[in-house]
């Protein structure tokens, strides 16, 4: 029973960390690499 709980906890942590990495990369792309009107001009 303990291994099942820790398996779900590990998958939750993996999902959380993956979501944080995705949000960080999305922030970099939208606000650092393609800020403002460059994003609109490029078709974003």
Image (spheres, helix red, strand yellow):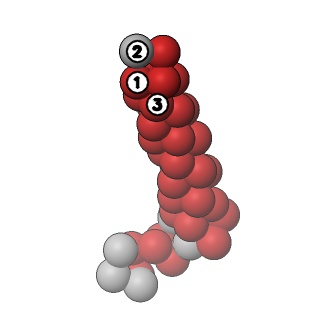
Residue 36 horizontal/vertical position (percent): 52, 64
Residue 6 horizontal/vertical position (percent): 51, 23
Q: Nearer the viewer, mark 3 or mark 2?
A: 2
Task: Answer whether labels 1 and 3 touch (C-beta < 8 Å).
Answer: yes
Q: Quadrant of the N terminus?
A: top left
- Report the residue that reaches farthest toward the front: 1
**Which is nearer the eye, 29 or 11?**
11
Instruction: Tell me the distance, in whole angstroms, between the alpha carbons under discs 1 and 3.
Output: 5 Å
**Which is nearer the eye, 44 or 12?**
12
Q: How many marks?
A: 3
Task: Answer whether labels 3 and 2 touch (C-beta < 8 Å).
Answer: no
**SS class of the residue under badge 1?**
helix
Residue 17 vertical position relative to residue 42 in the rendered view, above or below: above
Residue 22 vertical position relative to residue 42 in the rendered view, above or below: above
Q: Which mark is residue 4?
A: 1
Q: Which mark is residue 1?
A: 2
Task: Answer whether labels 1 and 2 touch (C-beta < 8 Å).
Answer: yes
Q: What residue is disc 3 on?
A: 7
Residue at the spot 46% in from the left edge and 31% down from the top edge: 7
Q: Quadrant of residue 32?
A: bottom right
Residue at the spot 56% in from the left edge and 72% down from the top edge: 34
């Amino acid at each position: 029973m303990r291994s099942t709980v820790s398996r779900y906890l590990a998958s939750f942590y993996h999902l959380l960390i993956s979501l944080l990495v995705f949000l960080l990369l999305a922030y970099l792309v939208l606000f650092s690499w393609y800020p403002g009107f460059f994003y609109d001009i490029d078709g974003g």
